[in-house]
Image (cartoon, helix red, strand yellow):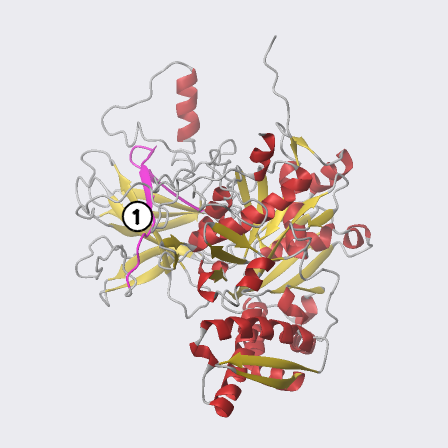
Amino acid sequence: MPNVRFKSTIHPVGIDLGTTYSCVSYLTPQGQPVTLPNSSGEMATPSIVFFVGDEIIVGTEALRQSVANPERVISQAKRHMGDPNKCWVIDGHVYRPREISSYILRYLLDAAEDRLGRIHHAVITVPAQFSDLQRQDTIEAAYAAGLDRVDIINEPVAAALCYVLSDGAWFAEIANEQTILVFDLGGGTFDLSLVNFHRDIDKVQVIASGGDLKLGGLDWNQELIDFACDQFVRESISDPRVDRESMQALAIEVEQAKRSLSVRPRTTLVVQHDGRRKTYTVNRDHFELLTHPLVERAEKITQGMLKAHGLGWAKVDSLLVTGGASRMPMVRAMLQRISGTTLNNSLNPDQSISHGAAYYAGMLLSGQKLEKSSLKSEATARLGAMKQQSVSGRALGLLIRDMELNERRPHYVIPANTPLPCAFRQRFGTIADNQKTVFLQIIESGTNPEDPPVEIGECAIAELPDDLPAKSPIEVTMRYTDQGRIEVTAIDVTSGQIAKTTIIRATEQDSDGTVGGETRTVADSPQTVEVLDDPQPIPAPPGVSLANAAPPKPKPERVTATGSTQKTRPKVRPTISEGNSPTVSPRKPKKPRPTSVSLEKAERPVPLCNRCGEPLNHKGHCPRCERRRQQSAGRPKNSGPGTVGANVPTEPLDGILQVPSKPKPKLRRKSDQRKN
C-alpha cells in the first residue's frame, strides 16, 4: 500500500502575551475570532507565576497567593525580555524572563487545547518597539512552551487587522483608502502605529511606528502606590515600601482603585502595614494630577510621530484606541483634545490584540498547501486576499569608529520605519592585504532618540579568498524579515561567493555595557569600522521580491503545565543556554580579534532571488540556486582556489540558536498525557 500523507487539521490561534494580562483566541470555521477562557473560566489571565514547592501556578490563583508569599512570585516578565542580566532565584533555581513567559504560554495553550486539541502553531504578538533580542526571547519562550512553529506580529498591526477584518469594517461602505492611527496603551507598554488600509487591494500597510516600552498602566499604578505610601508615612512613620507583603497587597488594591476611577469620580484605597490599617479616599481629579506627566509622555510621542512624517490630524481618518490602560478617562480626554475627533471604540481593549493575531494566523494558514485548515472556503478566500506590511521599529546598523574623534559611534544602514521585509547592502573594503576575516558589531537603535544603541550581536565573516588585496569589496547585506527578525549575510565581490557569516549574540553584559567581561575601547579595538560614505537606500526595483518569512524551526522539546500547576520544573528548549542569551555555539577561549573593514561606498537595496529570497551576487545570479542546479546535474561544487565558503551552508540564519543547555526535568503536555 503506498504511503499516504494525511493532512492534519490546523486551527488559527493568536496569543496576546501581555505584561499584566494575557489571552488566547482562535478563528471559527466561519473566520470569526473567539477568545478562549482559561481553566478558571476567565478570558484574560494575569501574567504572573507563583512557585510553591514543586508546583508552578499561573494566573489568578498565583495573584491571590502572592500577598502572603511575595518572594515566590514573578510578574512583569515581558518588561525584561531580551535582558541577559535579569533573573529571579527561587529555591535555588534561576529563572529568566523568557522562561517565565513560557510558563504563561503553556498555561494558555493547555486551556486552549481542551477545546481545540493539539496546537502546533500560533501567532504571538509583540510591541512594535521590541528589539531583535526581545523578539527572539518571545519566540524561544513559545518553543519552550511546546509549539512547533511560531510567528510573531506587532501588536498595533494586530489591532489594525482586527479592525479592518471585523464585519463592520469589512462590509461597510468606506473610502477606498483609510489612514488609521492605532493607539495601544497596555499594562506595561505603549505602542503607536500609523496604518494605511487599502480596501481595493485588501492591504494593511504600516507607515510609521513609535511608542515607549516603559510606559503602561503599571506606571499609573506606581503613582498611586507612591501617593498612598507617602500618606501612610506621614501618619504612621513606618514606610510600607520596606515590606514586600505590604507592597504586594497594596499593588492589588491600587489596580482595583485605578479601574474604579475609570468609571467613578472617587474610590477608597486601603493600606495595611506594620499592624496598622489606613483607608484613603482618592478622587479622579487628584489621580489625574498625579499622573499628568505620564499623559504628557504619551501625548508627546503621539504628536512627535505625526510631525516626523509631515502629517496632521486632518489626515487621520480613524483614531483606533485599544489596550486596557486606554480606558482611563484622562487618556481618552487627551486624545480627543489633540485630535479634535471622536475616538473609535469599536475594538475590545482586552481582546482585540489576540483577535488580530488569530486573523493573522488565518492569513498565514490560507497559504499552506500541506495542512488542512479548520476554516471554510469562504473564510480562507477572504483571509488569503488580505495582506499586511509592517515597518522596522528600530534602525539597524553597525558600531563604527569616528577617526576624527577617535571614538565609537553608531552607523545605521537601515533606517527606522522602513517597510518590511527589506534588505540593504553596504559595501565595505578590507584594510589589509591577504585579509582572511572581518569583524562587525551589529546594533539596533534605542526606542527613543536619546537612548543608546543596543548591541545585538557580532558578525564574523571568515574564509575570504587567498591573496586578497586591501580595499577589496565585501558587500554586507542586512535584512529585516517581515516579522522584524534580523539576518546578516556577506558576499565577496571578487569571487562572487557568499562568505561564511556567523552571528554571535551578546551573552553577558557588565555594568559598563561590555560583553563577557571584556573592556572594549577604540584604542584596543581595531575591528571597529570607519565610515567613508553614508548609505543612500532607494526602493527595490519593481518585481523584485524581498524576503519571505523564515521557515519553521525544527520540532523542539516541550514543556507543559497541568491545569494551573506544574509538578516539577519544566525543561527549557535545548537551544537556550541557561544563564546566557542565545549564541551560535558554546563559549570558547577568546581568540585575537580579526581585522576590521572600512566603509567604501553605499549602494541601493539588495535585489533578492525570487525563488529562495537570497541576495543576488554582482552578476545578478543567485549563488544558492546555482549550487542547487549544479548538484541536481551531478556536478561537484567549485571548491578550487579563491572560492569562499564553498562548503559552508548559506541558508538564512535560522539556525543561530544551537546551544546545548543544562538538562532540566521534562514535563509532558496535557494533550500527551490524555493519549496515555
How many dots with numbers?
1
Q: Which residue type carries mark 1?
A: Phe
Q: Residue at x 70, y 47 (%)?
A: 202
Quick check: can you spot residue 300? no
Q: Where is residue 156 shown, x and y percent of the image?
A: 61, 58
Whether residue 268 is visible to the viewer of this picture, yes or no, is yes
Residue that badge 1 annotates: 428
Write down the region rendered in magenta: 486-510
Q: Quadrant of the C terminus?
A: top right
Q: Position of residue 381 (x, y in %)?
A: 73, 37
**Residue positioned 44% across, 68% down in the render:** 449
Considering every residue shown, the one lying at the far front of the view is 275
Q: Residue 510, percent across and down?
A: 28, 61
Which residue corresponds to the image point at 34% horizontal and 47% vertical from the top-left? 427
- Quadrant (top left/top right/bottom left/bottom right) for the N terminus: top right
Residue 498 counted in the magenta span: yes
The magenta stretch spans residue 379: no
Along the line of sight, the residue nearer the viewer: 327 or 56: 56
Residue found 49% across the figure and 68% down from its top: 214
How would you rate the neighbour count of disc 1 (Cα within 10 Å): few for under 14, some for 14-19, many for 20 or more? many
- Give the residue furthest to the top: 1
Which residue lies most toward the bottom here? 235
Toward the viewer: 72 or 374? 72
Report helix, strand or loop for mark 1: strand
User: Image quarter for residue 96?
Assistant: bottom left
Q: Is residue 352 above or below residue 622?
A: below
Q: Is 420 situated left or right of 451 in this image?
A: right
Left or right of 591? Residue 631 is right
- Vertical comparison of 17 with 447: above or below: above
Task: Give 40 or 643, whichever is nearer the viewer.
Answer: 40
The answer to which quarter of the image holds residue 269 is: bottom right
Query: Where in the figure is residue 600, as x and y percent of width and height?
Result: 30, 50
